[in-house]
Image (cartoon, grey):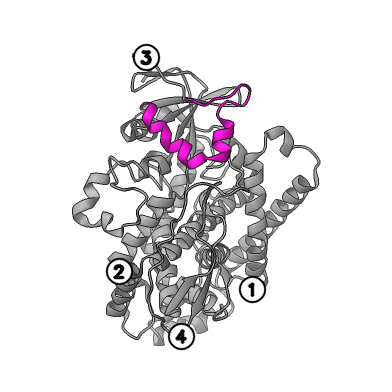
């Protein structure tokens, strides 16, 4: 609501001429952003000469995202930079009728029944990918987790019959696409528009990605249009096999919902949404899984409880999608990894007019910053927040955290894929544990880097087919960035 401000808004200490707090955000982003809690419920920082207003109180963050969301538009430096890559996908499109229409159109893709129809096909794909890792060789876990999440999501998005050459090129292209996108969000806009080799290479990769998406869309459209020549034989087969129709349903993709909609999106809009979904599925889910495996290696009792739960539910048979609801401890472990490491650390909105936020004046056009990482490391809500403790999420404890766990956002812009993310996370974690009876960290303790997500700087592991004695690794994972970290408020 707009009203006269009644509280002075403090400016965070440590700002420098010209660059403001940019140096602190670049060198120590996570300690800096959490330190702002000590300076008030709304704190002014400067990004270069431009002021931004960081909300540190979860009650006021809810006002920005839910109660008064109409006056805090999706925007700011982060969104403006990502929009160059995403186009007008659901994550970046401006508030208004187009956003509401697209969200309503896509919502059925992510209901639990729709996801369940594709769950077992995802499990098969994940098992094939994880099972192909060579035994006993150090592997880059962050890269592996991004690859397996992409493989699973491609099956869910475009169906289990996506041509192998398309799936392979998606897998090869996306890591460089993500690196280029991160670079675009870090650099000043005028630099990204220069005809530099890196800018041209990124533009070419994005163009190729859109061409691949077009081919995948055409493949799905050809499958969805009209009866196939052997439709009669298929119907006869279905009559004799009750699982045939279900199997065929799993071979379709979530994207079929958009292709068969009464008022379908344009080809450009379909591309934008596919890019948004693919990127969200890879970066956030892959990061969470990498940190989860790392924490498991450091907490043998957590690993033991996870393996015991899986053994009780699955015994010697393969994992099925229906098993996921019977793995509550695995869910708690994943939720604690999400809490501790983000995955996003900084998100922006734009004030559409002069606003009173908790008694602080936020001028029209100003960036309003909120940080899931800051809220999820609040010692007043999460005791000893740097400690990994899955039992924070037991039924008796979870009520006290309400309003401070914001990894999926809140309000009308809350992540549409939350249900899918939980399913994919549980499938991959369970599959890794069942495929590999033991794994260990082979790199030094990873350091958390605040880029788009809170990612590890380096994390390698060895995976083994035979169980080994569980030993505790008490080395501390630091949340300070490594020396090669390049991060800024436009990267979350």
Tell me how far mark 1 sits from mark 3, CA to CA: 59 Å
Q: Nearer the viewer, residue 68 or 128?
A: 128
Q: Is residue 375 above or below residue 341?
A: above
Magenta region's main secondary structure?
A: helix
Question: Residue lying furthest top in this view?
Answer: 4
Q: Which residue is mark 3?
A: 5
Q: In the image, 125: left or right of 302?
A: right
Which SS class for mark 2? loop
Residue 237 circle label: 4
Which SS class for mark 4? helix
**Whole-percent x, y for residue 286 in the image:** 51, 60
Proximity of marks 1 and 4: CB atoms separated by less than 8 Å: no
Tell me how far mark 2 sits from mark 3, CA to CA: 49 Å
Tell me, yes or no, if residue 118 can be seen here: no
Q: Nearer the viewer, mark 1 or mark 2?
A: 2
Q: Nearer the viewer, mark 1 or mark 3?
A: 3
Lower sequence index among marks 1 and 3: 3
Which SS class for mark 1? helix
Q: Quadrant of residue 332?
A: bottom left
Tell me how far mark 1 sits from mark 4, CA to CA: 26 Å
**Whole-percent x, y for residue 204 in the image:** 75, 52
Q: Which residue is mark 2?
A: 327
Q: Residue at x 55, y 80 (%)?
A: 136
Question: Residue lying furthest front in this view?
Answer: 474
Tell me how far mark 4 sits from mark 3, CA to CA: 71 Å
């Amino acid at each position: 609501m707009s009203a006269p401000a009644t509280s002075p808004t403090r400016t965070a200490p440590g700002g420098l001429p010209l660059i403001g707090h940019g140096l602190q955000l670049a060198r120590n982003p996570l300690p800096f952003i959490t330190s702002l809690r000590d300076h008030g419920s709304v704190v002014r920082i400067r990004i270069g000469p431009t002021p931004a207003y960081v909300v540190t109180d979860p009650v006021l963050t809810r006002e920005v995202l839910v109660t008064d969301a109409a006056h805090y538009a999706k925007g700011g430096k982060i969104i403006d930079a990502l929009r160059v890559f995403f186009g007008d996908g659901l994550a970046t499109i401006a508030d208004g009728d187009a956003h509401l229409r697209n969200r309503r159109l896509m919502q059925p893709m992510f209901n639990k029944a729709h996801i369940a129809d594709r769950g077992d096909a995802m499990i098969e794909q994940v098992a094939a990918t994880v099972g192909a890792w060579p035994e006993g060789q150090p592997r880059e876990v962050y890269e592996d987790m991004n690859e397996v999440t992409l493989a699973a999501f491609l099956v869910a998005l475009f169906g289990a019959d996506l041509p192998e050459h398309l799936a392979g090129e998606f897998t090869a292209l996306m890591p460089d696409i993500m690196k280029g996108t991160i670079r675009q969000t870090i650099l000043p806009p005028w630099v990204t528009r220069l005809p530099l080799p890196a800018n041209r290479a990124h533009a070419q990769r994005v163009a190729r990605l859109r061409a691949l998406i077009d081919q995948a869309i055409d493949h799905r459209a050809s499958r969805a249009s009209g009866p196939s020549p052997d439709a009669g034989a298929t119907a006869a087969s279905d009559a004799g096999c009750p699982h045939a129709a279900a199997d065929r349903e799993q071979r379709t993709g979530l994207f079929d919902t958009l292709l068969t909609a009464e008022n379908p999106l344009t080809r450009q809009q379909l591309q934008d949404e596919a890019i948004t979904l693919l990127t969200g599925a890879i970066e956030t889910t892959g990061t969470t899984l990498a940190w989860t495996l790392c924490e498991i290696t450091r907490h043998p009792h957590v690993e033991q409880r996870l393996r015991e739960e899986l053994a009780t539910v699955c015994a010697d048979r393969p994992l099925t999608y229906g098993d996921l609801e019977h793995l509550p401890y695995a869910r708690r472990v994943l939720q604690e990894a999400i809490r501790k490491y983000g995955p996003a650390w900084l998100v922006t909105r734009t004030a559409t007019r002069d606003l009173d936020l908790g008694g602080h004046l936020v001028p029209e056009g100003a960036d309003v910053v909120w940080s899931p990482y800051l809220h999820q490391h609040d010692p007043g809500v999460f005791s000893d927040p740097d400690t990994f403790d899955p039992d924070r999420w037991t039924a008796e404890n979870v009520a006290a955290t309400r309003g401070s766990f914001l990894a999926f956002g809140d309000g009308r812009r809350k992540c549409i894929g939350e249900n899918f993310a939980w399913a994919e996370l549980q499938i991959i974690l369970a599959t890794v544990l069942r495929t590999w009876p033991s794994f260990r960290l082979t790199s030094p303790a990873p350091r958390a880097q605040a880029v788009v997500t809170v990612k590890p700087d380096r994390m390698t592991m060895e995976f083994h087919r035979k169980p080994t004695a569980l030993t505790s690794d008490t080395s501390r994972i630091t949340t300070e960035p490594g020396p090669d970290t390049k991060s800024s408020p436009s990267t979350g």
